[in-house]
Amino acid sequence: MSEHKNSNSWTLALVALGVVFGDIGTSPLYALRESLNHAKPHAGVPLDVLGPLSLMFWSLIVMVCFKYLGFITRATNQGEGGMFALLTLFRSAKKFTPQTTAGVVLGGIFGACLLYGDGMITPAISVLSAVEGLALLDAQLGTGLANYVVPISAAIIFGLFLVQKNGTARIGVAFGPIMVLWFITLAILGVINISAYPGVFSALLPHHGVNFLLHHGHESFVLMGLVLLAVTGCEAMYADIGHFGRPPLVRSWFVIVLPALMLNYLGQGALVLSDVNASLKPDYHHFFSLVPKPALIPVILLATAATIIASQAMITGVYSLTQQAVQLGYLPRLKIIHTNPDVRGQIYMPQVNFLLMFACLALVFNFKSSTNLAAAYGLSVALDMTFTSILFFLVASHVWKWPVWKAALPVCIFLVFELGYVSGSLLKFFAGAWFPLVVGLCMWIIMKTWMDGRGILYQAMLRGRLPVSFLVDEIKKDRIIRVPGTAVFMSASAEGLPLALLHHLKHNKALHKQVVLLTVRFEEKPHVADAERFEIEEFHDDFFRVVLRYGFSESPNVFEDLCDALETKGKVKRNAITFYQSREVLLTNGPGKMAEWRKKLFVLLSRISRPATGYFDLPPRQVIELGIQLEV
């Protein structure tokens, strides 16, 4: 979506409603309901309703307005945000010991991994919460549709993942207008029902939230874990800052999103306060009870569309996160399909899509309701928020050179809320909060194993390398037969001769007239300027080393950039280029210092990893792979 940056700021604000604020914008479907179901309000005790409402309001103010829009969205790497961008900013300080840096990086990677759990739960809970409006429709009309909430939700989720391969460019155009209609509907429903109890506006005063926490002891921690549901989606705001820039997000939030959310929450609270006993009935739905009967079916359809958009934004976010992880070397190379030839940023990852779909469907069939899923939702978001705050403090104090007190003051305020969210979510651990934690831990183990394994493999490959001067001497002495064409040997390192070249020379006893040693590097910054795209070094006549550089948010165009580099040294016959890539066959009996089960996991990950030539989308008829056995 990089093309968005050239659009009008108000147009970007419209598009951001669907892409950025879809998750937080559908929270009224379940957030206050879960908080009040836990608080169990009593007739004549307004604090039981005003307290949770106040906590939600101030969570939105502190976490969204103050933390993310006020501070975190300013911590960008070349305008790009997200956990990996923040990590690369931290690493740029280079003021910490290797052990400290490694520890912080591993913690940050774990924070990023937690978003995979969030990406699995968001579509499930969002779609379920919208389709559950059929239960209220069933109570009014006796349609019998309430019995089909789970299969209908599963069918919608299945269809959503099924269309991902077609790209989101066309349906994405409708996201903004649909979400504008959704937020207008939220505001109107809230305004209509606030008249039932106008005193609900006092919930905007912070003392109601404080008093509620002080009077409910242990239960107040659980409530904080549920209040968190109102601010899920904040990380999307930071991750998508590179697509839109900060001003459009600020406009969307303050002009449309925040007023609509608060009016709707106040409307729900007013309706409960006007008849507390009715709100305690098992079939009571806090959001859909706001809707006049004639408008119930259209609002259910609109809510379903809004939750699909929220789910789509999260799915796209997981694709982008995975692509960044791959290009920073945290995950094996996975298949990436560019769904729009004109926009390199729009991608589809079939393996990730299948795993997300399977997990979402499993969650729907296992938990069966948004209330049950609410127990699983939140812990990953709360921990990710906490990691973001800690990393922000390190960046502000060591990269931006802020005084410690200046960096620590806002972070301490953030942590007061976030530690409350984490504590409340942990208390729901056995009720389902374990799920995103297990998902995050599994992803962290996979990333850590891949990083360690690649380090061991890199050392193993270096042990068998020869210096470039060895081959140059052989060429100068005419000891090697030369054949027409250009041979490009892919190499992970810009040092020595790649093993693929040595094996090719050993078995074929000849070399092409033009030889290129090609290394593709992903830098710890989102984008690399065109002027810095390639570096070319000439060892001998028609014998070069080319290093191509890309940012971790870029989609590499290796073939075109390589041809551009070679054209600076003369003419290039594109059809005469042959790419050689070593395909390592790994054995686990090597000297690498890694547990046996992790070595086996690394071998498995290596098998599913795409060869560099395939990952870089090189012409398939111009690629030759050479098998090489290595011990790790």
Image (cartoon, grey):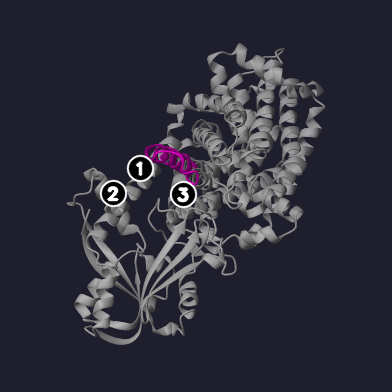
- Tell me the residue that label 1 is attached to: 445
Q: Position of residue 505 (x, y in %)?
A: 23, 77
Q: Nearer the viewer, mark 1 or mark 3?
A: 1
Contact between marks 1 and 2 (CB within 8 A): the answer is yes
Q: CA distance from mark 1 to mark 2?
A: 10 Å
Q: Tell me: residue 554, above or below residue 536.
A: above
Residue at image mark 3: 356
Q: Residue at x 64, y 45 (%)?
A: 22
Element carrying mark 3: helix
The amino acid on which the numbered mark 3 sits, given as a three-letter code, is: Leu
Q: Give the left or right position of residue 346, taking residue 610 as reference.
A: right
Q: Which residues are magenta?
A: 91-115
Kindly identify the residue that appears in the image at 38 percent across and 65 percent down.
612
> Residue 115, how many percent across, how many down?
49, 42
Q: Rate crowding at label 3 as few (under 14), some (14 to 19) or many (20 or more) other CA atoms within 10 Å.
A: many
Please tell me which of labels 3 and 2 falls first in the chain. 3
Asked whether residue 282 is in view, the answer is no
